[in-house]
Image (cartoon, rainbow, N blue to C red):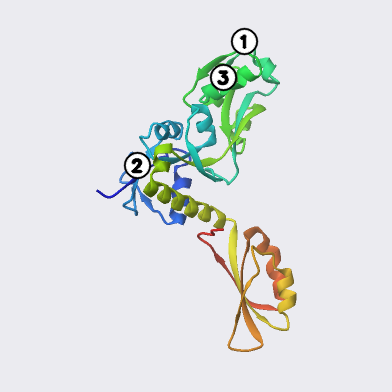
Amino acid sequence: MNPVLRIGIPKGSLQEATFALFKKAGYEFRMSSGRSYHPTVNDPEIEPLLIRPQEIPRYIEQSILDCGLTGKDWIEDNGSQVKEVAELTYSKATRNPIRIVLAAQNGSSIKSAADLQGKRIATEYVRLTERYLQKHNVQAAIEFSWGACEVKVPELADAIVVNTETGSSLRAHNLAIIDTLLTSTTRLVVNHDAWENEWKRAKIENLAMLLRGALNAEELVGLKMNVSRAHLEAVNAILPALKNPTISPLAQPDWVALEIIVAEDTVRDLLPKLKRAGAEGIVEYPLNKVVY
C-alpha cells in the first residue's frame, strides 16, 4: 500500500482562502458536493479531511490526522501538544493576523478585566478565557457559545471573547474592544509520531515550503525590461531587490535584458522612474511561488 498523508483542512470561513493558497502551491482541491467532508486533491499521496479548525489540533495530537492547518488560537485553547512546522500568515479577508479579544457594549461599566468580576462571558474560547480570568484573579461565569457571540450582548451576556480580523462585526453591534488575549495566525502543525516518520516528515516539509512560497509570491511581482548599457547604472540604482537583478545580453551588444523581483506595492511608483532612467519594454508579471 502506498503511503498517504492525512491532512486536516479548516472548514468554514477559512476554507476558500485555504483552497486558494493550496492551488497556488500546486495542490488543487475539488468538492463533490457542498456538504462533502472529503475533498479530492491532485496528489494521490494526500488524503484531506475538511473539519472545523477548533477540532484539528486535538485530532492531530491523537494521531487521527498526521497534520493540518489551524489557528494558533485553537492550538492554545485546546492546549494541544503538536509540533508547529510553519506559520502561514493568511486569513479569510486579508493577510493580517486575527486577534482574540474581550469586548463589551460601548458605554458599559466594563473597562478592564477587573470589571468582569461576577459577570457572564459568552465565548467559543472557554479555556483561553478561563486562563485569562485566572491571570487577572477574576471570578466570572463563562458560557460556551456556538458563534454569533456579538448578538448576545447585553441581554444574554455582559461581555464576549471572540476572534476579529477587521473589527467590523464588533463595531456593527456597538461593541468596544477591552483587551486582546492573543494574536493568532494560521499554522501548519503535525503530530510527533508523523514527524518521526521519514516519509511523512519529508512530505510535510515539502508542503510547508510550497505553501510558504505561495504566500511569499502574493506580495511580489516580476519585472522585465530592456536597458542600454549607457543607462544600466542609473536603472540599477533605482531597483529595490531581493538580490541583484539578473542581467542577460541581447543581440544588440549595447543593450541588456534585466529581470528582477520587487514588492508589488512599489511598482506604481517604480515604473515611471525606471522609464525616465532609460528602461524600455518594461513588463510586469505575477508570481505563483517564491522560495527563499
Question: What is the distance, in whole Å, between disc 2 and disc 1 at their CAs?
Answer: 43 Å
Q: Could you tell me which secondary element the residue under label 1 belongs to?
A: loop
Identified at 43% across, 42% down, the residue is: 195
The amino acid type of the residue labelled 2 equals Gly
> Quadrant of residue 263 in the image?
bottom right
Q: Is residue 282 above or below residue 205?
A: below
The first of marks 2 and 1 along the sequence is 2
Left or right: where does residue 236 sit relative to residue 60?
A: right
Residue 98: % across, % down: 58, 37
Quadrant in which residue 137 is drawn: top right
| Horizontal and vertical percent position of residue 128 | 56, 24
Read off the residue under disc 1.
Answer: 118
**Crowd band around label 1 with a 10 angstrom C-alpha radius: few (<14), some (14–19), many (20+):** few
Q: Is residue 8 visible?
A: no
Is 139 placed above or below 9 here? above
Q: Which residue is mark 2?
A: 34
Measure the alpha-carbon separation of dots 3 and 1: 14 Å
Instruction: Say whether marks 3 and 2 touch (CB < 8 Å).
Output: no
- Looking at the image, tell me whether mark 3 or mark 2 is earlier in sequence order: 2
How far across and how far down the image is residue 44, in percent? 31, 52
Q: Is residue 195 left or right of residue 235?
A: left
Q: Position of residue 15 (x, y in %)?
A: 44, 42
Residue that carries the numbered disc 3 in the rendered image: 130
Under mark 1, the amino acid is: Gly
Image position of 277 (left or right of 53): right
- Inspect the image, locate mark 3, and give the three-letter code of the amino acid beneath it: Glu
For the residue carrying disc 2, how many other residues have a C-alpha within 10 Å: few (<14), some (14-19), or many (20+)?
Answer: few
